[in-house]
Image (cartoon, grey):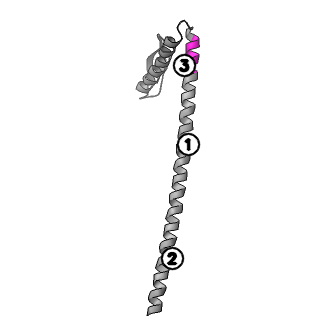
Amino acid sequence: MPQVSVQIAGRTYELACGDGEEARVQELAAYVDEKVTDLRRQLPGTPEFKLLVFASLLLAEESREARGAAKAAETARATATDSAETLATALEDLITARVDKMSKKVSGAA
């Protein structure tokens, strides 16, 4: 299992990760570090452990919002699919009715 070295809040951590996931783990760690750095600027003098807790809460909030947005998008997609299917069925019924009507006119005229 590969090892990756990441820095968060000025500390280096050695972490194990899956094959090929090293860059992704470093990218995620950099994002966490960015959150901690932003919080450190906003809350000078706050102990590091609190900054890490605040960063965790902010990231959890982002994750929850993203899951909510994804769920809303899936619901909208499903609704659009249902509407498209309903419209296609209505159009098919209309075309069938018109063809039947035209067939009756042609049969009646013959």
Question: For the residue marked with disc 2, what is the amino acid?
Answer: Ala
**SS state under label 2:** helix
First in sequence: mark 2 or mark 3? 3
Q: Nearer the viewer, mark 3 or mark 1?
A: 1
Say few, some or many: other residues with alpha carbon within 10 Å of mark 2 (under 14 / 14 to 19 / 20 or more): few
Q: Nearer the viewer, residue 22 or 84?
A: 84
Report the span colored magenta. 49-56
76 w.r.t. 54: above or below? below
**SS state under label 1:** helix
Magenta region includes residue 55: yes
23 w.r.t. 91: above or below? above
Question: For the residue marked with disc 1, what is the amino acid?
Answer: Ala
Q: Which residue is mark 2?
A: 97
Q: Which residue is mark 1?
A: 72
Q: Residue at x 47, y 14 (%)?
A: 37
**Secondary structure mainly formed by the magenta segment:** helix
Per the rendering, the mark at residue 55 is: 3
C-beta proximity under 8 Å, tags 3 and 1: no
Q: Residue 71: percent from the left, percent from the top?
A: 56, 41
Q: Residue at x 54, y 28 (%)?
A: 62
Q: Nearer the viewer, residue 73 or 32?
A: 73
Q: Nearer the viewer, mark 2 or mark 3?
A: 2
